Image (cartoon, rainbow, N blue to C red):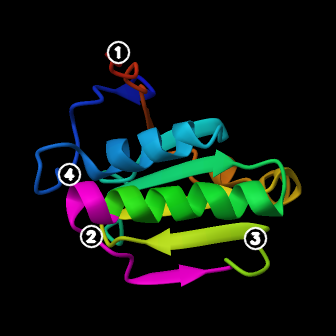
Protein backbone atom coordinates (compact mmCIF):
# COMPACT_ATOMS: atom_id res chain seq x y z
CA UNK A 1 0.00 0.00 0.00
CA UNK A 2 1.52 3.32 -1.11
CA UNK A 3 1.61 6.44 0.97
CA UNK A 4 0.72 8.99 -1.71
CA UNK A 5 -2.35 9.55 -3.84
CA UNK A 6 -3.07 11.30 -7.08
CA UNK A 7 -3.41 15.04 -6.39
CA UNK A 8 -6.56 15.07 -8.52
CA UNK A 9 -8.36 12.91 -5.94
CA UNK A 10 -10.10 15.55 -3.89
CA UNK A 11 -13.13 17.52 -2.87
CA UNK A 12 -13.70 20.28 -5.40
CA UNK A 13 -14.69 23.90 -4.92
CA UNK A 14 -17.31 25.69 -7.00
CA UNK A 15 -14.57 26.47 -9.54
CA UNK A 16 -13.55 22.83 -9.96
CA UNK A 17 -10.25 23.33 -8.14
CA UNK A 18 -9.74 21.16 -5.04
CA UNK A 19 -10.20 23.23 -1.90
CA UNK A 20 -6.95 21.86 -0.48
CA UNK A 21 -5.14 23.07 -3.61
CA UNK A 22 -6.50 26.61 -3.20
CA UNK A 23 -5.24 26.59 0.39
CA UNK A 24 -1.92 25.07 -0.70
CA UNK A 25 -1.23 27.80 -3.26
CA UNK A 26 -2.16 30.49 -0.73
CA UNK A 27 0.22 29.02 1.86
CA UNK A 28 2.99 28.75 -0.73
CA UNK A 29 2.51 32.40 -1.67
CA UNK A 30 3.37 33.39 1.91
CA UNK A 31 6.42 31.10 2.02
CA UNK A 32 4.92 28.49 4.33
CA UNK A 33 7.37 25.67 4.98
CA UNK A 34 7.03 21.90 5.14
CA UNK A 35 3.58 21.86 3.58
CA UNK A 36 1.80 18.53 3.50
CA UNK A 37 -1.70 17.47 2.55
CA UNK A 38 -3.13 14.41 4.29
CA UNK A 39 -6.03 12.52 2.73
CA UNK A 40 -8.17 11.36 5.65
CA UNK A 41 -11.09 9.91 3.71
CA UNK A 42 -10.13 6.31 4.49
CA UNK A 43 -9.27 7.08 8.12
CA UNK A 44 -12.03 9.29 9.55
CA UNK A 45 -15.32 10.92 8.65
CA UNK A 46 -14.98 14.36 10.28
CA UNK A 47 -12.79 15.79 7.48
CA UNK A 48 -11.50 14.73 4.08
CA UNK A 49 -8.15 16.56 4.07
CA UNK A 50 -5.67 18.27 6.37
CA UNK A 51 -3.32 20.95 5.12
CA UNK A 52 -0.41 21.24 7.56
CA UNK A 53 2.28 23.90 7.22
CA UNK A 54 4.71 25.99 9.22
CA UNK A 55 5.37 29.71 9.55
CA UNK A 56 8.58 30.88 11.17
CA UNK A 57 7.04 33.41 13.57
CA UNK A 58 3.72 34.87 14.73
CA UNK A 59 3.39 37.46 11.94
CA UNK A 60 4.11 34.85 9.27
CA UNK A 61 1.71 32.30 10.78
CA UNK A 62 -1.01 34.96 10.76
CA UNK A 63 -0.12 36.09 7.22
CA UNK A 64 -0.32 32.50 5.95
CA UNK A 65 -3.72 32.04 7.57
CA UNK A 66 -4.99 35.41 6.30
CA UNK A 67 -3.97 34.53 2.73
CA UNK A 68 -5.57 31.08 2.92
CA UNK A 69 -8.82 32.58 4.25
CA UNK A 70 -8.83 35.27 1.53
CA UNK A 71 -8.13 32.84 -1.31
CA UNK A 72 -10.69 30.31 -0.07
CA UNK A 73 -13.33 33.04 -0.02
CA UNK A 74 -12.27 34.41 -3.41
CA UNK A 75 -11.82 31.13 -5.33
CA UNK A 76 -14.05 28.66 -3.49
CA UNK A 77 -16.66 31.00 -2.06
CA UNK A 78 -15.99 29.44 1.35
CA UNK A 79 -15.46 30.95 4.77
CA UNK A 80 -14.22 28.87 7.68
CA UNK A 81 -16.83 27.44 10.04
CA UNK A 82 -14.45 28.21 12.88
CA UNK A 83 -10.92 29.54 13.45
CA UNK A 84 -8.94 28.83 16.60
CA UNK A 85 -5.58 30.15 17.78
CA UNK A 86 -5.21 33.19 15.53
CA UNK A 87 -4.32 35.69 18.27
CA UNK A 88 -1.67 33.47 19.85
CA UNK A 89 -0.54 32.17 16.43
CA UNK A 90 1.33 29.12 17.71
CA UNK A 91 -1.21 26.92 15.97
CA UNK A 92 -3.99 28.39 13.83
CA UNK A 93 -6.72 25.88 13.02
CA UNK A 94 -9.24 26.73 10.32
CA UNK A 95 -12.24 24.46 9.79
CA UNK A 96 -13.71 24.37 6.28
CA UNK A 97 -15.71 21.20 6.90
CA UNK A 98 -14.05 18.91 4.35
CA UNK A 99 -10.68 20.64 4.84
CA UNK A 100 -8.93 21.43 8.12
CA UNK A 101 -6.06 23.91 7.81
CA UNK A 102 -3.28 23.77 10.42
CA UNK A 103 -0.71 26.59 10.40
CA UNK A 104 1.94 26.05 13.06
CA UNK A 105 4.99 27.79 14.39
CA UNK A 106 7.98 25.40 14.40
CA UNK A 107 7.80 24.63 18.14
CA UNK A 108 4.09 23.76 18.15
CA UNK A 109 4.38 21.68 14.98
CA UNK A 110 7.15 19.59 16.52
CA UNK A 111 5.30 19.26 19.83
CA UNK A 112 1.91 18.21 18.44
CA UNK A 113 3.23 16.05 15.58
CA UNK A 114 0.01 15.76 13.58
CA UNK A 115 1.83 13.81 10.89
CA UNK A 116 2.70 11.19 13.51
CA UNK A 117 -0.80 11.16 15.01
CA UNK A 118 -2.39 10.76 11.57
CA UNK A 119 0.27 8.42 10.15
CA UNK A 120 -2.41 6.13 8.75
CA UNK A 121 -3.66 8.90 6.47
CA UNK A 122 -2.37 9.08 2.93
CA UNK A 123 -0.03 11.90 1.93
CA UNK A 124 -1.17 13.68 -1.23
CA UNK A 125 1.54 14.31 -3.81
CA UNK A 126 1.73 18.08 -4.16
CA UNK A 127 1.13 19.22 -7.73
CA UNK A 128 3.61 21.66 -9.22
CA UNK A 129 2.54 25.29 -9.27
CA UNK A 130 1.12 26.52 -12.55
CA UNK A 131 3.57 28.67 -14.49
CA UNK A 132 2.71 32.35 -14.34
CA UNK A 133 2.64 34.46 -17.46
Residue shown at 28% from the left, 60% from the top: 74
> In the rendered picture of this protein, how many numbered marks are placed on residues?
4
User: Where is residue 12 drawn, in percent x and y?
Assistant: 17, 50
Q: Is there CB contact under 8 Å for labels 2 and 1? A: no
Answer above or below: position of 52 versus 101: above
Residue topped by disc 4: 11
Residue topped by disc 1: 131
Tell me the quarter of the picture where residue 95 sits: bottom left
Q: Nearer the viewer, mark 4 or mark 2?
A: 2
Q: Nearer the viewer, mark 1 or mark 3?
A: 1
Q: Nearer the viewer, mark 3 or mark 4?
A: 3
The quadrant of the image that shows the N terminus is top left
Residue topped by disc 3: 89
Disc nearer the start of the sequence (3/4): 4
The quadrant of the image that shows the C terminus is top left
- The extreme right residue here reads 107
Amino acid sequence: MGNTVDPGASVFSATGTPTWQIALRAAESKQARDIIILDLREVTSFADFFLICTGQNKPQVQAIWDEIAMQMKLHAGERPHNVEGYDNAGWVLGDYGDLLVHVFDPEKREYYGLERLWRHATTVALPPASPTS
